[in-house]
Amino acid sequence: MDLMEKITSLAKRRGFVYPGSELYSGLGGTWDYGPLGVEMKNNIKKAWWKATVQERSEVAGLDSAIILSPKVWEASGHVSQFTDPMVDCKKCKKRYRADHLIEEIEKKKLPSRDEEVVEEHALAAHPEVVKDLNEKLRGVKCPNCGGDLTSVRQFNLMFKTYVGPVEDASSLAYLRPETAQGIFINFSNVLASSRQKIPFGIAQIGKAFRNEVTPGNFLFRSREFEQMELEFFVKPGSDKEWFNYWRKVRFDWFARHGIRQENLRLRDHEKDELSHYAKAATDVEYNFPFGGFKELEGIANRGDFDLGQHGQFSGRDLSYFDEQTKEKFVPYVIEPSVGVDRAFLAFFVDAYREEKAPAANKEEGETRVFLALDPKIAPVKLAILPLVKDEELIKVAKDLYQRYQSIWFVAYDEVASIGRRYRRQDEIGTPYCLTVDFETLKDNAVTLRDRDQMTQDRIKIEELDNYLMTKIC
Ligand code: ATP
């Protein structure tokens, strides 16, 4: 089994992530988060919100609607530009992203569904791009069945729906393909209802939908996902400085939450990669097991494009008046934008460890599998285990369980040998196991086992609160 197979199998078996609509043979590009997955995902969102909103007086939170006025997507350019070029096989009907197919051909390797080359959406849907792709694909046959391919068409990635009972052009609407636009259209509202002054930010976490031509690589690219986005509004001229600031802050956030630095890097976009409105862009990349470093988070200096466009399309003045300098300007915006699910995948993959148990420690058997997750991200913070099924031990353990349940998501387990129970917790990344044994009844202390080191410390019950708070929070 390769690493990704092990990861997806563990994720399903232990209730982190299941394939979407599996009961009905699945629905491509969708995933369901199980009991542990939802905890871990919430922890990622909480950690981001804490660092981005809670700990910063200059950032305010927002939760905008998923369905926005279709005018929003005209102003943002998504209706005309948010497209991927695709070709279909006339015979087997298989669909390809034209640019990916060309890349694969150039690499002299034909694509399989999941070995997708990842790159920016072709936001610039210029006719020359399509012409060029058509030329490159002339004479190319379907890698799947050898059939003829259609010519290249631009495929808009936004999911369409209708608002109200009538399904016609006047009721057409879209599920948002990013959360950012909900922020831009509320710029004036937040400014008026909070006491923010530039520089300040608005942050949002929420679902986004993209009808990706080729979803794949587990959670990396799906059709329904969540984003954590910050739009940080600054005075033009100070944008470069703020861009550099957020590049560093966001890189550090991943490292601070347990992702190994050697698997992270910052990659600046070349001039020809930039969207027409972006002044600069950098990706925080993670070294994924499929094909190496790929975008985990994008940080862009978007200039005044967004507020400028919405100002123009809505006819409202979205400029900012600086009381101190008496200057009026349309703020520039720095946008760090990351997918929750893609971050989940990076945390999961990076934490996955297989380790031969030391000879002195027979409890684990041959190979120990564990998730070295940061305690803040781990779904279960603490497992409480009576050493054996003894009434008195169970009573103490259940009291402790109840106590810590009110603080964290904790587990209680009395089934199977203690070694097996440790192993079960290791596999889901529980940082600490607390064992109540017969000594506990005499000395009022418990054994605390550390997941990564497998060390066991004896701690007095009355000192547990302090001890655990420093380790877990
Ligand atoms: P990609 O080039 O990988 O398609 P993008 O540049 O189009 O990504 P953005 O529009 O910058 O992505 O979105 C910001 C973030 O949202 C990405 O860095 C990624 O973490 C996440 N994201 C984007 N598309 C998807 C998707 N289809 N599935 C999961 N996460 C996604």
Image (spheres, grey):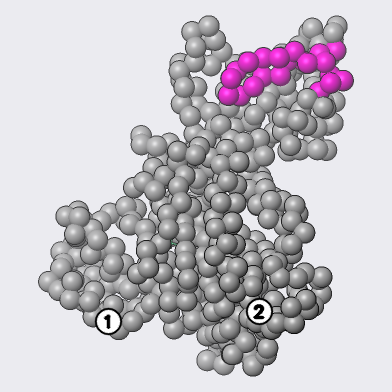
Element class at badge 1: helix
Location of residue 277 in the rendering, given as x and y in whole percent from the top left corner: 47, 76
Residue 411 found in image quarter: top right
Q: Would you say residue 290 sits in the magenta stretch?
A: no
Q: Residue at x 82, y 15 (%)?
A: 460
Identify the residue position indicated by label 1 in the image. Answer: 128
Query: Hey, what amino acid is under mark 1?
Result: Glu
Q: Which label number is shown at residue 452?
A: none
| Residue toward you, 176 or 170 | 176
| Region of the chain picked out in magenta, as a range | 444-464
Identify the residue position indicated by label 2 in the image. Answer: 185
In the drawing, does residue 214 fall left or right of residue 174? left
Q: Which quadrant of the rendered structure holds the C terminus?
A: top right
Location of residue 451 in the rendering, given as x and y in whole percent from the top left corner: 61, 24
Q: Would you say residue 449 sits in the magenta stretch?
A: yes
Does the image show residue 9? no
Q: Residue at x 85, y 6 (%)?
A: 442
Looking at this view, name the residue that lies furthest to the left.
Answer: 139
